[in-house]
């Protein structure tokens, strides 16, 4: 079984709809991250969480919100989706106590299309 | 956090040849990581090199780090079709610093 899973894997929605992307991990890591990837722009950090009580904005948090329901779960919400939020979204985890403490482990991604 | 810049943006080579891609960064680091991304998939960690290391090997991968030039290179020897992917570097100051990923080098291996 995959260590970091994301649901759904693909989603098509309409402008103005609220969307939730979910991430679960079985790695036992405290740190979790949400990124989006657009062609030619690399990965950009949306939000990150260093533990259940810690939520931080990344470089492009406008239009997004997150919830860290448990150590293993980190959800990303688009309150009112717009077409320029069409992108590939990745969740990642890391363990600050590991030897390579900021090595990140990525989920398979969610391809979101906003019409 | 700081972002690495990969160069070249795209590289095409024949299968069996070696592929070299470079990464430059701006400020001092604790470590630098390389990741691979197959088309449409999540990034996969390849190798981490610490600031006090100059070279590191992992299978067909060789990473070098020159902290005086603030640069790193990733060499893939005897390339295979399965090496076709995008490669990203992520320099890090360590601690609670977040990783920042650039746009990567898109490597295409021609059979």
Image (cartoon, grey):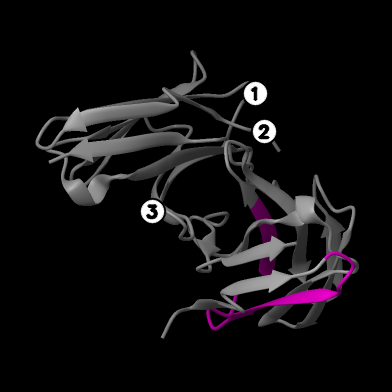
B86 sits left or right of A54 in the view = left
Q: On the same chain: label 2 and label 1?
A: yes
Circle 2 SS class: loop
Q: Quadrant of the C terminus of chain B?
A: top left
Secondary structure state at the residue bearing disc 1: loop
Give the number of callouts: 3
Q: Which mark is residue B38?
A: 3
Point out residue A114 in the picture as x, y percentages from the top left corner.
74, 62
Which numbered marker is on residue B27? 1
- Could you confirm whether marks 2 and 3 are on the same chain? yes
Circle 3 SS class: loop
Write the start and end of the magenta stretch as one range: A15-36
Report whether residue B13 is seen: yes
Work out whether residue B32 or residue B103 is closer to the camera in this orientation and state it: B103
Which of the two residues, B26 or B67, is positioned nearer the viewer here? B26
Eye-nearest disc, 2 or 1 = 2
């Amino acid at each position: 079984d995959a260590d970091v899973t994301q649901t759904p894997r693909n989603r098509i929605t309409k402008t103005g709809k609220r969307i939730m992307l979910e991430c679960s991990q079985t790695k036992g890591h405290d740190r979790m991250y949400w990124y989006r990837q657009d062609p030619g722009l690399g990965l950009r950090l949306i939000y990150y969480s260093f533990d259940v009580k810690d939520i931080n904005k990344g470089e492009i948090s406008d239009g997004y919100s997150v919830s860290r329901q448990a150590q293993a779960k980190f959800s990303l919400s688009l309150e009112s989706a717009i077409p320029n939020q069409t992108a590939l979204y990745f969740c990642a985890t890391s363990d600050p106590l590991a030897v390579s403490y900021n090595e990140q482990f990525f989920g398979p991604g969610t391809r979101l299309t906003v019409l | 956090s700081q972002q690495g810049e990969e160069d070249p943006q795209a590289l095409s080579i024949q299968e069996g040849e070696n592929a070299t891609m470079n990464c430059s960064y701006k400020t001092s680091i604790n470590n630098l990581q390389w990741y691979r991304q197959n088309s449409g998939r999540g990034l996969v960690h390849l190798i981490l090199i610490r600031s006090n290391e100059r070279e590191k090997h992992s299978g067909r991968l060789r990473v070098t780090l020159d902290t005086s030039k603030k640069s790193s290179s990733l060499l893939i020897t005897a390339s295979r079709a399965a090496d076709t992917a995008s490669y990203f570097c992520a320099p890090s100051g360590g601690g609670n610093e977040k990783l920042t990923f650039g746009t990567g080098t898109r490597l295409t291996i021609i059979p």
